[in-house]
Amino acid sequence: MAVTAPAFETIAPPAASVRKRRYTEDQVPIGKLLTRMLAGLVVLVVFVLPYTIMFFGSVKTKSQIRSVDPTYFPTEWHWENYLNMWSTPETPLPQNLVSTIVISVCATLLVLAVAMPAAYYTARFRFPGRMVFLFLVIVTQMLQPAVLTSGLFRQFVALDLIDTWAAMILVNAAFNLSFAVWIMHSFFAGVPKEIDEAAQIDGAGRLTVLFRIQLPLVWPGIVTAIVFTFVACWNEFAASLVILSTAGNQPLSVALTKFVGQYETSWHYVFGVSIVAILPVVVLFMLIEKRLVGGLTAGSVK
């Protein structure tokens, strides 16, 4: 009678031990982790320290800032500076804030409305002069408003648009359009054409393909274009200084210079207005960052 050897069953280790071993294999060594944390802390201090000093200066008095023996931390915290700066005689700061918001938002929307179909068309169709057109678009990025201020001034005088929000909306949109077109063009070009063809077979038109099929796929590129365009419009200075002469129409970047006089400078108001001007941009990046990362990772795992 033949005797068969007993079969040995392989017993899988408990799931908990597997997870624990995988964690111990993938974890970063403590030395490398501390080095990364130290490097990140140094970078954080380098970037945050100027804003921290600016914030401390915004809650000091003029005499404390100009003291012969200055201190980094204020001896007395004057929070009323953030209220008093809105009613200073140098400039109507509330109107300047409204002007900045209107110009930046409208210019960003205009850039988005023009750049999106232009980028989609150049990425999907091969037409005569396509590369020349793209080259000319990127060449315009080399021109800055500071170089063309005199020509822009004469042009808007002829159009009867001098000292108006419309003039600055057109200027900001024109000088940020090329960057937005190139950013969106690269994202549209990265989407396979078969997706468009499949949607068209199902009866979708060009506009339907653009807005309902393409836009969700290129959302990270659109967000990038929106953020950089808005920040560039928010910080624009040279053209606003020349084209906008009325104090109430000028943005915050120009209004900030009104506190710097020939013989005296209100540094506490300069710092306070700078903090107020920075906050909307910081909040925008905080809100967009999650959407940008979510858009980049969407569809990576099925």
Image (tube, rainbow, N blue to C red):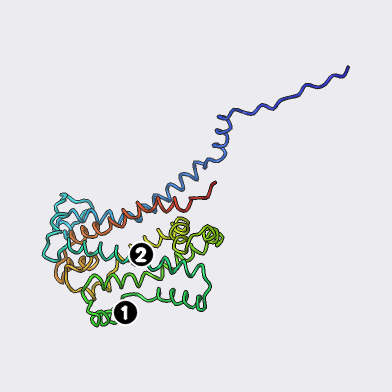
Q: Nearer the viewer, mark 2 or mark 1?
A: 2
Q: Residue at x 24, y 54 (%)?
A: 55
76 in relation to 86, above or below: above
Q: Quadrant of the N terminus?
A: top right
Residue 256: x and y in percent read 21, 65
Most distant residue in the front direction: 203
Distance from disc 2 to disc 1, alpha carbons, whole Å, reads 19 Å
48 in relation to 112, above or below: above
Residue on which the image places disc 2: 229
Q: Of the two numbered discs 2 and 1 on the same chain, state the one appearing first in sequence.
A: 1
Residue 3: x and y in percent read 84, 19
Q: Residues within 10 Å of mark 1 (few under 14, many from 20)?
A: few
Q: Residue at x 47, y 76 (%)?
A: 135
Quadrant hosting residue 234:
bottom left
Residue 62: x and y in percent read 14, 59
The residue nearer to you, when weighing 244 against 21, is 244
Q: Residues within 10 Å of mark 2 (few under 14, many from 20)?
A: many
Q: Secondary structure at mark 2?
A: helix
Quadrant hosting residue 154:
bottom left
Residue 205: x and y in percent read 47, 62
Horizontally, is 280 left or right of 302 in the view?
Answer: left
Residue on which the image places disc 1: 148
Q: Amino acid at mark 2?
A: Thr
Horizontally, is 285 left or right of 86 in the view?
Answer: right
Q: Amino acid at mark 1?
A: Leu
Horizontally, is 187 left or right of 230 in the view?
Answer: right
Q: Secondary structure at mark 1?
A: loop
Q: Residue at x 27, y 71 (%)?
A: 168
